[in-house]
Amino acid sequence: MTVTENSPTLSENEVKFEELLAMGAKIEPRDWMPDDYRKTLIRQIGQHAHSEIIGMQPEGNWITRAPSLKRKAILMSKVQDEAGHGLYLYSAAETLGADRTDMLEKLNNGKMKYSSIFNYPTPCWADMGAIGWLVDGAAICNQVPLCRTSYGPYARAMVRICKEESFHQRQGYEIMLTLSNGSAKQKQMAQDALNRWWWPAIMMFGPRDDQSPNSELSLKWKIKLFSNDELRQKFVDIAVPQANILGLTIPDKDLSWNEKTGHYTYGEPDWEEFFEVIRGNGPCNKERVSNRREAHENGQWVRDAAIAYAKKHAEAALSKAA
Amino acid sequence: MSTPLAPTKNDLYAYTLRQADNSMVLCQRLCQWAARGPELEEDIGLTNIGLDLIGQARSLYQYSASLFDRPVDENDLAFLRDPHEWSNLLLVEQPNGDFADTIARQYCYDAWHLPFLEQLTASNDTTLAAIAAKSVKEARYHVRHSSMWVKRLGDGTEVSHRRMQDAITAVWPFIAEMFIADELDQRMLEIDVGVDLRALQSAWESQVSALLANATLSKPIDVKAIVGGRQGQHTEHLDDLLLEMQALPRSMPNHQW
């Protein structure tokens, strides 16, 4: 709640804002909103957009090497969707007064973050399966509730994104299914990929609830609707039976079915690793950001040309009209 | 009126494969741009074109496969043939270079591909005609996209003008090949299955000349043509491209993916 020292009561704006939230109505760009609500959203939507853009790299890495024409077409389409998601999300952030160029600048110079999951490498084709199944699967658990988030443009962008993510998840699982039913070597590739991606996927939900500094306000403002641990549990409950169908083993010795709670109990991830990757010390942090920066810098002359051309021709059209 | 002559199965296979190889190789080049475009919109645009091309390649490979004398599928044709068995134009295998190089290659190809497909829609072979009819709509967008960029880069800044001019100069030796008909092209033309390549040349030249002039670019003159793609004589770039594309299926043959 935004209560300043000088005014112990809520302002008219604040009352209206709280009322809209309480009714479950959407906050729209022209509505008044607390500064921190705006800042939190710009941070979250911006990070989400950046995650889509950086997320194009680990999979883009396999587009040229996809082992069948069908897989290649699907992967191209998926990476293209990610660029599209980036675009909708930057647009949603722009409705809050942020600027895409400025946000990309902050991504390139490390001032804004993106999901740590994309700092892990994709050395094998099976990683395309594991990413779709687990990473997109975890993203769906996180993102489906965001279709009902309190900020209108973000919620609406998420509706479309979730539809596409669900296709991404299914194509990933299908890759895993094909590999698991293939040769012994293919099944091993699938198992190795599961071993590589399981814990990073578990950590995608963020720190434990008692360690998550931003969660409380986000829950109050209905930006977030479920806590990190609630979403993580949901993901584990969905993924374990899926792994069983594949005949693969989840690399968690503490994993067991809890009759009493009706949920799976799972082990503790290596949080030290999580924070190290966030601090920039994951296996691919430097590579991902430097590739991004390189693409941006190599494209500068192209963007300059497009602007110069548009300007020249707008001027020419004007002088013709005059 | 006499019944039109039918092509031999071998001729139809080889002719279809040529067109498939063009789409496949150019698609693979565009795939190499993934996450490297100058702007997000362009990442999406280039992938769109790549997706159209892979769709065309798949239809054509599937048709080729149905004409082959042993049971093969689209993946065998794309992933298990050696460079000398590929019959694409040399133009499409040229490396991406910078964005201007990619656009120069793309525009020169698109401006040829669209009228090629338009003619192919009238082919006596109903499958080729149907694939062409679907592809022609896609090629219309491709040529619009690439010609816009030739104009923007040619008539943009000093730097972009220089880069675009260099790129046009660099692709020019590979243009003549698009209009040279070999014996197979000739046979397919005679029975109204194939496209008259020579007939495409003058329209291509006037269209491209007009666009280059509009983009303040000059048309290269006295350029020695480099040819051989249709006969399997490729530049060294195709080898690298296929090495990357075919690596996994070749290292694990007879696997489903």
Image: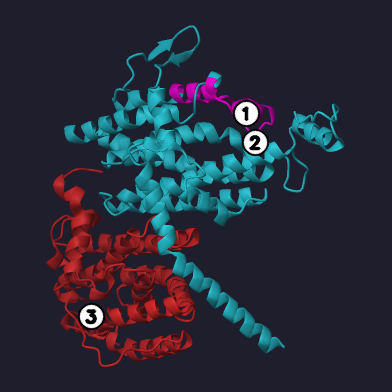
Residue at horizontal 44 percent and vertical 53 percent from the top = A80
Q: Quadrant of residue A196?
A: top left
Say above or below: A297 vs B223. Answer: above
Badge 1 and badge 3 in a common chain: no
Q: Residues within 10 Å of mark 1 (few under 14, many from 20)?
A: some
Location of the C terminus of chain A by quadrant is bottom right
User: Which color was chain A given?
Assistant: cyan
Residue bearing the label numbered 2: A149
Residue type marked 3: Met
Residue A23: in sight, yes or no? yes
- Distance of label 2 from label 3 (alpha carbons): 61 Å
Dot placed on the residue nearer the N-terminal end, 1 or 2: 2
B192 vs B100, left or right, is left
Residue corresponding to mark 1:
A225
Residue A159 visible in the shown view: no
Instruction: Depth check: give the residue in front, B52 or A99.
Output: A99
Q: What's drawn in magenta, residue-wise? A: A211-237
